[in-house]
Amino acid sequence: MYENTTYEMILQRMLDRVPDKFDKREGSVIWDTHSPTAIELQILYLELDVILREAYGDTASRDFLILRCRERGIYPHEATKAVLRGVFTPSSVDVTGQRFNIGDMNYTVAERIAGGEYRVECETAGKIGNQFFGTMVPIGYIKGLQSAELTEILIPGEDEEEAEDLRQRYFASFEENAFGGNRADYLEKANAIPGVGGAKVTRAWNADISPADMIPKESVEAWYDDIKGTLTGEVRHWLDSVFHAGKQKKLTTGGTVLLTIIDSGFGVASEALVQTVQSAIDPEANAGDGYGLAPIGHVVMVESAEAKEIVVKTTLTFEPGYGWGNLQTSIEEAVSAYLLELRKEWAGASSLTVRISQIDNRILNVPGIIDVQNTSVNGSRENLNLGEYEVPVLGGVDG
C-alpha cells in the first residue's frame, strides 16, 4: 500500500509546504533539516506496510498467523514421531525400552504387540521416521537377540504443520463453528490426532434401523420370559439391560457416529492408528459415556477407509531406445502420483472417480512415451466411480 511512498516523494511534499521566498535548494538549511525527517518517515511507511500485511490472515507471515489463529483457539500441529512395527527374534527376548539404529535414525522399542512384535517409535519427529525399513542394529548389547527388523508403519510421523495448511484451517474456522459434537467438531478433533490425514463423519450411520425397531414386540417379550431363566452371569445381565432399555424406549440410533479416517500419508489407516483414534474419541470400554473427545451419548465407531485396488492396462507406443523394460517404474510412479492426488481429495469429496483420461495424460508425460491407447481400469474402459469410503491404490500397470 505504501511501497510507492519514497524518500524523494516525502521530501518534495515537505519542501512544497515551505514558502518559495526561502532557500530550499539541496544543501540549504531548510533542505538539510527536512531530509533526515523524510528518511525516517520513509522507514515509518515501510513499517506500516509490514503491519498491514501482518494484520490479515491471508497475508500474515507464520509467526503473526499463529497469533491470529490463537484468537480462534487454533494452534499449529507439532511434528510427531513415527510408530512402526518391529519384529524381533527370538520372541523370548524382551526388547522393551531398547534402542536401535537404521540408516540415520534411532528408534526406541515402546511396547510389545504380540510374541516378537513390538511398537517401535522413531526418536526423531517428522516424516523422516517413515522412510526406513529392514534390519536394525542394537545400540547396546542385547543378550540372545538374533535379529531385529522394521516391517511397516503403524502411525506415520508428521512434520510440523506448514503455514499454508494452518492458514486454511484458520479460514475454515469462520465457515463452520466446531462445538458440541457437530460435524465440524468431529473433523477438527480427528484431524488433530497424530497420524490422521483426513476424516469423514457420518451421522446415525445405522440409520436403516428406526427407533421403533428397538422396542420389543409381544413375541420378543414372550421369548425373553422363556429364556431369561436359563441364563446367568454376564449374558443374563447384558440381555436384561438391552431388553429393559428397549422396553423403556431408551434405545435410539440418533447418537451413533461413524468416523472414517485415512493416515497422514493419505493411505489406508493401520489397525493401530484406528485403535488410537478410537481410544481418543470414544473408548470402546466406555462407549457413549463421554470419556473421550466425543460428547456424552455419542457412540462413535472408528474405521479406516477401504483400499480399492486399481489395475491399469494400456497399449503404449515408445520412442526409439525406450521400452516397457526401462520405463515401467516411471509409468507406475506417474499413475501412483495421480492416485495420491485423488486420495488427498477424499476427505472433502462425497466420492472419488478414477478417470482414464487423467491416467492417459500422466503416462503421456513420461519421457519416452509417444502414444497411449486402449486404456482400461479394472477391466473396463469407463471411468471408475469409487464408493464413499474407498480410496484408490495402485494394483499394477500392464503396458
Image (tube, grey):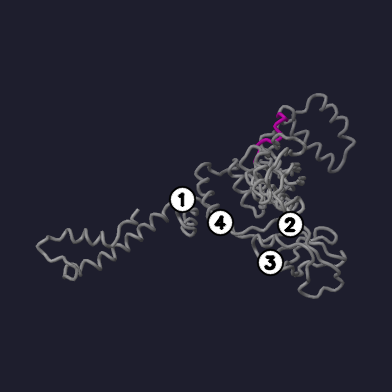
- For the stretch drawn in magenta, the main secondary structure is loop
Q: Position of residue 116 (x, y in %)?
A: 84, 62
Residue at x-position 64% and y-position 37%: 350
Q: Are marks 2 and 4 in contact (CB under 8 Å)?
A: no
Left or right relative to 295: residue 49: left
Mark before the other along the chain sequence, 1 or 4: 1
Give the amino acid type for the residue marked by disc 3 in the picture: Glu
Residue at x-position 70% and y-position 69%: 104
The residue that mark 3 highlights is 123
The residue that mark 4 highlights is 162
- Mark 1–mark 3 Cα distance, whole angstroms, equals 35 Å
Q: What secondary structure is found at the residue carrying circle 2?
A: strand
Q: What secondary structure is found at the residue carrying circle 3?
A: loop
Judged by depth in the image, the label closer to the viewer, 3 or 4, is 4
The residue furthest front is 320
The residue that mark 1 highlights is 58
Q: Which residues are magenta?
A: 201-210
Q: Are marks 1 and 4 in contact (CB under 8 Å)?
A: no
